[in-house]
Image (spheres, rainbow, N blue to C red):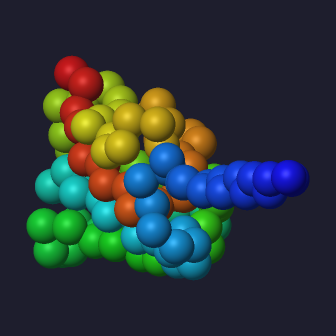
Amino acid sequence: MSRTFYLLVALVSCSGRSGPPDAAPMLTVTPLAGTRTTSTPPGIDCGDNSPNMCAAAFAFGTHVTLAVAPQETLPCFTFPCEMIEPPTAGIGCSDILVDGPVSLTIGCVR
């Protein structure tokens, strides 16, 4: 008498994402009043008259650099990118990884 055994294997994704990543995730910037924030590659351009936030879609995996310049006299020494969400997107304004929705605020260091 012979017996046949079957082994069933289930592959489960533990990434938390269902399906492929967003092809064009958004980078959302809350600018500091009196400054202009631009991005490289182009997409973000928050001038002094921008609404409370501005946003742009970037291709998944794009590395974005933000430049912040005063448009009026401000008591700031530098303008850092702060409160970056998610924190894994980067530190500071020089290399932000857009591999999902990212948001940040422009700060003022006196």
User: Residue 54: percent from the left, percent from the top?
Assistant: 28, 71
User: In front here: 22 or 31?
Assistant: 22
User: Residue 32: percent from the left, percent from the top?
Assistant: 20, 51
Residue drawn at the location 45% of the way across and 61% of the way down = 17
Tell me: residue 46, above or below residue 95: below
The answer to whether one can see residue 25 in this image is yes
The answer to whether one can see residue 106 in this image is no
User: Residue 60: percent from the left, percent from the top?
Assistant: 60, 67
Q: Quadrant of the C terminus?
A: top left
User: In front here: 11 or 28?
Assistant: 11
Tag count in the figure?
0
Q: In the drawing, does residue 25 fall left or right of residue 34?
A: right
User: Residue 6: percent from the left, percent from the top?
Assistant: 73, 57
Residue drawn at the location 45% of the way across and 68% of the way down = 18
Outermost residue on the top side: it is 110
Q: Quadrant of residue 30?
A: bottom left
User: In front here: 68 or 93?
Assistant: 93
